Image (tube, coloured by chain):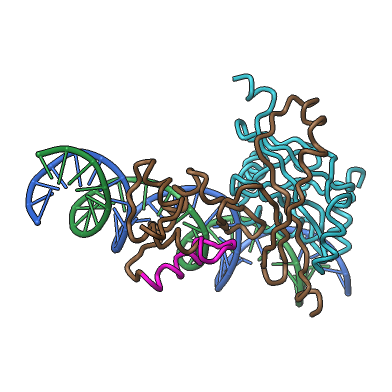
Chain colours: A cyan, B brown, C blue, D green
Amino acid sequence: MSNTSWIENKLKENGCKLTEQRRLIIKFFEAEPGHYTAQEVFEKVKGICSKINFSTIYRNLELLCNMGIIKKLDIESGISHYELNKPGHHHHVVCKGCGDMKEIDICPCETIANKELKAMGFQATEHKFEIYGYCRNCSKK
Amino acid sequence: MSNTSWIENKLKENGCKLTEQRRLIIKFFEAEPGHYTAQEVFEKVKGICSKINFSTIYRNLELLCNMGIIKKLDIESGISHYELNKPGHHHHVVCKGCGDMKEIDICPCETIANKELKAMGFQATEHKFEIYGYCRNCSKK
DNA sequence: ATTCATTTTGCAAGTCATTTGCATTTACAT
DNA sequence: ATGTAAATGCAAATGACTTGCAAAATGAAT
């Protein structure tokens, strides 16, 4: 009861059961903040619960996405990445060399796009802003 | 000789052969500007050249991308879209209802991100800015 | 016009991330 | 302890995209 996270509470509130697998996935995201592929989540959880299956990973990632607990990032590589959905949204700087993703707090949307969007009659609900290039390490090479 | 586009010339300059299939793909992008999936290109070209194969579509889309003639757009849906690579880059407004994509000329990158990126030692080469929401038609529903 | 090296194509099979159907297992309210 | 709805594991399916290879087509040289 001591280490029950807000996430587990939110799941319970919505009638979701707390299985070992689900707990481990959540714990992983909380313990190691970052952007992970389903593969990476799988490998990490498999280290503790060897019977876990890939479909369980995907089903839970989708569930957590739908509940707004994690966020799916569709970046250029074509492989989805997932991260904890922190309050105060941010965007990403993606290194084309090593694939590393860093967060940036800059958000261009409100300041620039609003009046153009209104003129188009477009109702914006979200946006994506990603900068690709080479990080400090990779540009030295 | 009359209707040889700059694209066909560019291909020739690079030692590429002008096959019927290749011509048709190019012609399609020039005749109907927009953002298309490989599937859509395939169907359109198949209407004229029924023997064309999907792998020919993909191979040519990749070729044209590498030559900077078309651009691949990785949007949220997970299916790649392709568009003619016009000079003066732009970004997109994507309707989550009907999937329609409209172009916007706004580009937030230079104005906002430069000094933060420099501080990170990140060398930006490109970026993506996409706004999702509902277009005029879809928000009326 | 014919020849020929090279490129490109069609076809079929293969990837690879992700999804789905289904029988079995598990969580948890009673 | 029991029952039921939810979740899991497994295996097979999906769907976008890629690849190997033999056959066909291009275009430069003859």
Displayed quadrant of residue A37: top right
Is A3 rendered above or below residue B23? above
Quadrant of the rendering where the C terminus of chain A is positioned: top right
Q: Which residue is at 83% across, 59% downward?
A: A116
Residue A6 versus residue D6: which sits nearer the camera? A6
Residue depicted at 67% across the width and 59% down the height = A59
Q: Is residue D28 left or right of residue B133?
A: left
Magenta residues, start to end: B30-48
A12, above or below A141, in the image? below
The percent position of residue A44, horizontal first and vertical second, equals 66, 40
Q: Residue B95: x and y, percent?
A: 72, 66
In magenta stretch: residue A133: no
Name the residue at 66% across, 34% down.
A133
Residue B63 location, x and y as percent? Answer: 44, 47
Q: Residue furthest right?
A: A2
Q: Is residue B32 magenta?
A: yes
At 62% across and 31% down in the image, what residue appears? A98
- The image quadrant of residue A83 is top right
Q: Residue furthest bottom?
A: B141
Location of residue A103 in the rendering, given as x and y in whole percent from the top left corner = 78, 38
User: Eyeballing the image, is C22 above or below A126?
Assistant: below
Q: Report the front residue among B10 and B131.
A: B10
